[in-house]
Amino acid sequence: MTCGDSPPAEKVILATTDSLRTLLTQPRCALGVFVPAGLHPPRAERRQLDQIARAGADLFEIGIAHHDASLDGPVIQAAYRRALSHGNVLARALRAVEHAAGLRPTVVMTYWGPVSLHGPEHLARLFADAGAVGAMVVDLPDHQAERWQTAAKDANLHTPRLVPRKIDDTGLATVAAGASGWLYAPASTAATGYRGPLDVPSLADFTTRLRAASPLPVVSGVGISTPALAARVAPLVDAVIIGTPVVRALMTAPEQAPASTTTFARALNPHATTETRA
């Protein structure tokens, strides 16, 4: 598959659900990178994914554009609007997932709207066939959780869950019982793209609570806006997910997205190099 002027990264096929657990149980903190699908033409998008993988991404989160991204801040909402304006949202997303999954373990990030529109069973199968190891529905309605989890399990997809900071013990037990892959602990209670200070002690308490409720790995994102903050969060979790810093680059100066990724990768693992990554 051609990827423009840059040579494609050597592909490492990791499209199994076990690959996600292997990655998240390593001693070091992994770096996940969120990329909204359909932001650029397919050829450019493939090249960007190749470059981000080489720059230090250990896993990809591929976002499905949605018109009501209520948990996201202005940068990701703008990216979604641009992707929606290009049309063929699902087809573009599946192409992005397929390419990303040939590089790193890949989880789809979506709102319930697209799942409801296309049908949980149908969409879970499409994601799995494209190579995704999981799909996280960030606003999964409680009354649809069982149906979604069954559909995903039948398709051999993990069902990571975003856990609200204020969830009570009963709700946490329910969410943990239906989750697989990971539990997502937002570093901030604000929308994505938050650039203020983080209450790291509060996040530490929350991740401890999640680990007491479930053996699943814990990952964190939302508000981890700088490499320094990523380094502070890393000891608490199994992976740090960055979104807005890379999406901002992809929106305005795509050639800078790999460099942004590298700065975060080095903050998480200062003694590692990215030059030999496949």
Image (cartoon, helix red, strand yellow):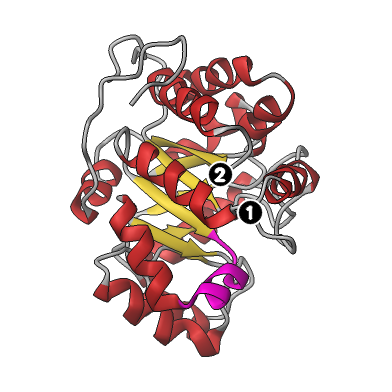
- Quick one: SS at disc 1? loop
Q: Residues within 10 Å of mark 1 (few under 14, many from 20)?
A: many
Residue at screen point 58% across, 68% down: 114
Q: Residue 175, can we see it?
A: yes
Mark 1 and mark 2 residues within 8 Å of each other at the beta carbon: yes
43 or 107: nearer the viewer:
43
Residue 115 on the magenta segment: yes
Q: Which residue is mark 1?
A: 65
Name the kind of residue labelled 1 in the image: Ala
Q: Residues within 10 Å of mark 2 (few under 14, many from 20)?
A: many
Residue 132 on the magenta segment: no
Q: Is residue 278 left or right of residue 266?
A: left
Q: CA distance from mark 1 to mark 2?
A: 7 Å
Q: Which residue is mark 2?
A: 37
Name the kind of residue labelled 2 in the image: Ala
Q: Quadrant of the C terminus?
A: top left
Q: Residue 237, can we see it?
A: no
Residue at screen point 25% across, 45% down: 25
Task: Locate residue 203, reporting x and y percent.
Answer: 57, 52
- Quick one: SS at disc 2? loop
